[in-house]
Amino acid sequence: MAVRAVRGAVQLQRDEAGHMAEQVAALLTEILERNGLTQDDLISIWFTATPDLHSDFPAAAARGIGIVDVPLICAQELEIDGAMRRVVRVLAHIETDRPRSEIAHVYLGAAAALRKDIAQ
């Protein structure tokens, strides 16, 4: 079993805790589904949020869908002129037999423009 990393992101329509929880939960669920993972395959998850998001911690959404025994951490993205606003990014470390080339990175909605090279 190898340790791999999977990336993802979602752009929020507004900075509201309920909306963040819904969108981050959808992103995490899609990451798990597209990669054939269960919560037991998760090692840790890093979340980052753009500086314009203040309503809640993205990690709270993970706890809300039952990811309770996995280390989670939140950080703030750099504030770069012209960067996409209201974005939550995910870097999940996982255990999987999939080769690196078969990892499905998930960029939902407008966030797909962030990484056209790896978004699937």
Image: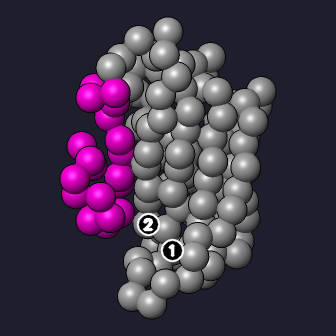
Question: Which sits earlier in the primary sequence, circle 1 or circle 2?
Answer: 2
Residue 101, percent from left and from top? 27, 29
- Say which residue appears at 51% left-offset and 74% top-offset: 86
Instruction: Let me know if residue 63 is in the magenta part.
Output: no
| Above or below, 29 relative to 42 | below
| Above or below, 42 relative to 106 | above
Apparent side of residue 35 relative to residue 54 in the rendered image (left or right): left
Counting every numbered tag in the picture gives 2
Q: Indicate the amino acid at tag 2.
A: Gln
Q: Indicate the amino acid at tag 1.
A: Arg
Q: Residue 33, located in which quarter of the rendered image?
A: top left
Apparent side of residue 88 relative to residue 40 in the rendered image (left or right): left
| Residue 63 appears in the rendering | yes
| Above or below, 9 relative to 70 | below
Are the residues flagged by discs 1 and 2 in contact, CB closer than 8 Å?
yes
Q: Local crowd at mark 1 within 10 Å, few (<14), some, or many (≥20)?
A: some
- Say which residue appears at 24% left-offset and 43% top-offset: 120
Which residues make up the magenta segment?
Answer: 100-120
Instruction: Let me know if residue 114 is in the magenta part.
Output: yes
Residue sitting nearer the eye, 80 or 39: 80
The circle on residue 86 is 1
Residue 93, percent from left and from top? 56, 33
The circle on residue 23 is none
- Say which residue appears at 72% left-offset and 42% top-offset: 72
Residue sitting nearer the eye, 111 or 5: 5
What residue is shown with label 2? 11
Residue sitting nearer the eye, 22 or 108: 108
